[in-house]
Image (cartoon, rainbow, N blue to C red):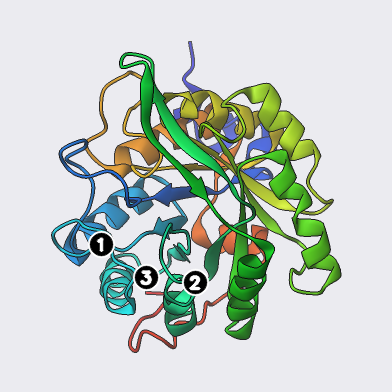
Amino acid sequence: MIDHRYSHGAEDNRLAFRVVDPCVITCAMSGVAANRDQCPGIPYTPEDYAKEARRARDAGASVLHIHARYPDGTPSYRVEEYRAITEAILAEVPDIIINLSTGAVGIPIEERVQQIVALKPELGALNMGSMNYAKYSRKRKSLVFDFVFANPFSEIIYLLEQMNSVGVKPECECFDTGHIGNVEPLIDMGLLKMPVQFSLILGVLGGAPADPRTLAHMASLLPAASTWEVIGISRRQWTLVASACSLGGNVRVGLEDNFYLPSGFMASSNGELVEAAAHLVELSGREVAEPVEARRLLSLQDPPDRSAYPGASPHE
């Protein structure tokens, strides 16, 4: 049997459609909730983030979603930690697309967006609605945590105004179908510009269940010409990644969302998770997008604005 993965030249009979349907892979590197007691691969220091960024980029990631931490691993919402982490990442992988978080509970809204204004990433995460946010343990027969994730329109509008003031594209994170509907008035107000970038998050208790049929329904509700990715929480992530590939969406993996590989073994790094996602992308007949192609697909400026990082170059 001929292994067509390694055939070249005149004998190369790979199908042409593989080069016209790229898929953007985002890597969510750390989150804020988990620590190394739960997963040793989670980065803490800027140097850790840089090494993980290299592993993720080499495996196929074009976008990095970043929550900042102090060097001891506790969450930080300060510009200083975001700057140090992002500078270390860009020194290692200068062509990567940076996406900074704004999500938090109990943190003043001004502190949740200050890193966006100061550092001007290409993408800024924007939660599109309030919800119950919980985790249930079947073994314990009780909730592991339980809180309300509040994102009223007044805060969404404030975050959008701040992002727009520095030319950062919002990444609209939707945990349920109602969150998708919340986009429409913001488009009508001129605060959101088409095409909108959506992240469809499935698997959080209180939001949409981690089911491919739910993902297909959510994708069907998006405004025409939108771009979207799936964020699958915990082990069901891999079913949802495969589904998104089939539906024409992009995908996000990383130690923020899920620690485990399709085999059931815990990942030692973000790179292993991205590598598994890239394999699913290729098995679906699509190709993994490089950062230049990802910027085109996501309607981002190329080259990006790196004015907040003197000396950084996206073309090194």
Q: Which mark is residue 69?
A: 1
Provide the secondary structure element on which disc 2 rests: helix
Mark 2 crowdedness (10 Å alpha carbons): few <14, some 14-19, many ≥20: some
Q: Quadrant of residue 89?
A: bottom left
Between residue 43 and residue 22, name the one nearer to us: 43
In this rendering, which labeled residue sits more in front, label 2 or label 3? 2
Amino acid carrying label 1: it is Arg
Assign a secondary structure to mark 3: loop
The percent position of residue 313, horizontal first and vertical second, equals: 39, 80
Q: Which mark is residue 94?
A: 3
Label placed on residue 23:
none
First in sequence, mark 3 or 1: give its number: 1
Q: Is residue 244 left or right of residue 310?
A: right
Q: Is residue 59 above or below residue 15?
A: below
* Placement of 237 over or under 188, stated as above or below: above
Q: Position of residue 177 (x, y in %)?
A: 72, 40
In the rendered view of the protein, which quadrant contains the C terminus?
bottom left
Residue on which the image places disc 2: 109
Residue 146 locus on image (x, y percent): 43, 38
Q: Earlier in the sequence, mark 2 or mark 3?
A: 3
Crowding near the residue tagged with mark 1, few <14, some 14–19, many ≥20 C-alpha atoms within 10 Å = many
Left or right: where does residue 175 sit relative to residue 203?
right
Task: Say which of 38 and 166 sits in front.
Answer: 38
In this rendering, which labeled residue sits more in front, label 1 or label 2? 2
- Residue shown at the point (41%, 66%) measured from the top left: 107
- How far, Cα to Cα, is label 1 from label 2? 18 Å
Instruction: Answer whether residue 210 is visible to the viewer in this image.
Output: yes
